[in-house]
Image (cartoon, rainbow, N blue to C red):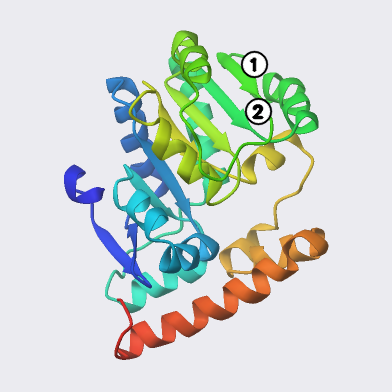
Amino acid sequence: MTQATGLETGRVIGAPVTVGTLATATATVLKAAEAGGGGYVCVANVHMVTTARRDSHLLDIMEKALWVTSDGMPLVWTLRAKGHGHARRVAGPDLMLRLLEEAEKKAFPVYFFGGDAPTAEAMRKRLPQQFPNLKIAGIESPPLLPLTPVVDEATVRRINESGAGLVFVGLGCPKQEYWMAAHAPHLKGVQLGVGAAFNFFAGTVRRAPRWMQRGGLEWLFRLAAEPRYLWKRYLVTNSLFIWYTLGSLLGSKGKRA
């Protein structure tokens, strides 16, 4: 991952997380996209790093990413506690927004893969309003995909022939990470697993206020908005994350740093 690109990497309960800013993340992704060599970006939050703790395949995918963002203040706080005092949050929706702004300026084609049909339709209507000069190479809502993906040659051909340099993937974690890793050797554009960001840009889900984002409470806002969908994930994942993090910071035996 960042070892190959010279970027600083920290560890959060064993998972690699890139230490950087939104500006450096944007510049790194754009440089890779302009080079046309593919690759992918993982947008890491508490759910992802906790899942990777027990999922060696997901952990390996994160290790090989171009960048693993610190999408969540708990990750930033953990990195700072481990000596990375300049760690900053790089939220997936913020990175996506910055990249779309830059893509619009550079006439750089982008592709959106994921989400359900209503979300895709809403994005088709809203994105041209927000980014009137953005070159949208495609917006595709795929059928239900298996957790373990098989390389879809037709999808690869469509995306590559569209000329997209950036491919935003919204399938949810860890499915989107599995999908990106499987297709990375075949796609020319850089993939970014942005999950719920599709809903934000479609206007179907609101983001938390800035003060909640800065305070590490965005998860609480989302839980209040989608309790039936998220309560179990947050209850289990957040509890495990706290347990693993305490063990890591205290240097407990058997805990990966």
Q: CA distance from mark 1 to mark 2?
A: 25 Å
Q: Is residue 257 left or right of residue 156?
A: left
- Give the image location of residue 148, x and y in percent: 51, 43
Q: Is residue 75 left or right of residue 124?
A: left
Q: Which amino acid type is marked by label 1?
A: Pro
Q: Which mark is residue 132?
A: 1
Tell me the quadrant of the picture where the C terminus can be found. bottom left
* Secondary element type, mark 2: loop
Q: Which amino acid type is marked by label 2?
A: Pro
Nearer to us of marks 1 and 2 is 2
- Please determine whether, in this image, residue 241 is positioned above or below residue 100: below
Could you tell me which residue is drawn at 34 percent across and 90 percent down? 250
Could you tell me which residue is drawn at 53 percent across and 37 percent down? 96
Q: Nearer the viewer, residue 101 or 242?
A: 242
- Give the image location of residue 88, x and y in percent: 41, 60
Q: Is residue 212 left or right of residue 70?
A: right
- Please determine whether, in this image, residue 235 is positioned above or below residue 122: below
Crowd class of label 2 (few under 14; some 14 to 19; many from 20; radius 10 Å): some
- Please determine whether, in this image, residue 178 is positioned above or below residue 187: below
Residue labelled with disc 2: 142
Q: Nearer the viewer, residue 170 or 186?
A: 186
